[in-house]
Amino acid sequence: MIWIEILTAVALLQYIYFGALVGNARDKYGVSAPAITGHEMFERYYRVQMNTLELLIVFLPALWLAARYWSPVAMATLGTVYVVGRFVYLKSYTQDPASRSLGYGLSFGPAVLLLLAGLTGSVLAAIKSA
């Protein structure tokens, strides 16, 4: 499970990094807290952070649940695609929000697959123990 633990820490560090980018964008584009609007580039960085948070609450429990029933190395590999997808999402969304689809797919897809793997493993375990 060491790879799951490492990937969990990486995903959380990525989220913290995205938060730091939002803070930098606040300063650079003159958007004072608590405002969340005011400059398009600030809003792009803010949306990347918020979208990452929205997916993170699915991704992390799904990662751990899937790794309980399936190969932790395989689940961590799938989870790595999520982390890479978030960086692709950051780059594409801040350049042109209309181009965010690839990054979103590379992060949403693994999160859903991990959730389905965890659910499948749980159901199979329940059937086996019945």
Image (spheres, rainbow, N blue to C red):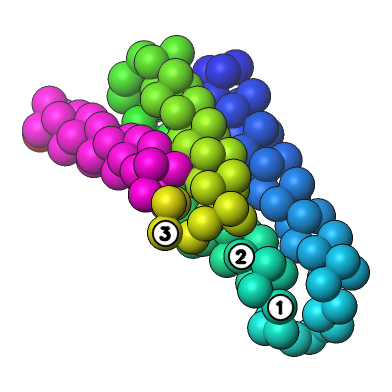
Between the residue at mark 2 and the residue at mark 3, the CA separation in whole angstroms equals 11 Å
Q: Position of residue 97 (x, y in %)?
A: 49, 60
Q: Position of residue 20 (x, y in %)?
A: 81, 55
Residue behind mark 1:
39
Residue behind mark 3:
98
Under mark 3, the amino acid is Ala
Compared with 59, 95 (above or below) is: below
Q: Nearer the viewer, residue 89 or 20?
A: 89
Under mark 1, the amino acid is His
Q: Residue furthest front?
A: 96
The quadrant of the picture occupied by the C terminus is top left
Disc tally is 3
Q: Earlier in the sequence, mark 2 or mark 3?
A: 2
Compared with 46, 88 (above or below) is: above
Under mark 2, the amino acid is Arg
Residue behind mark 2:
44
Residue occupying the point 85% across, 83% down: 32
Q: Main secondary structure of the magenta part?
A: helix
Instruction: Find the magenta span and give its range.
Output: 101-129
Query: Mark 1: few, some, or many residues within 10 Å (few <14, many ≥20)?
Result: some
Query: Mark 2: few, some, or many residues within 10 Å (few <14, many ≥20)?
Result: many
Between the residue at mark 3 and the residue at mark 1, the CA separation in whole angstroms equals 17 Å
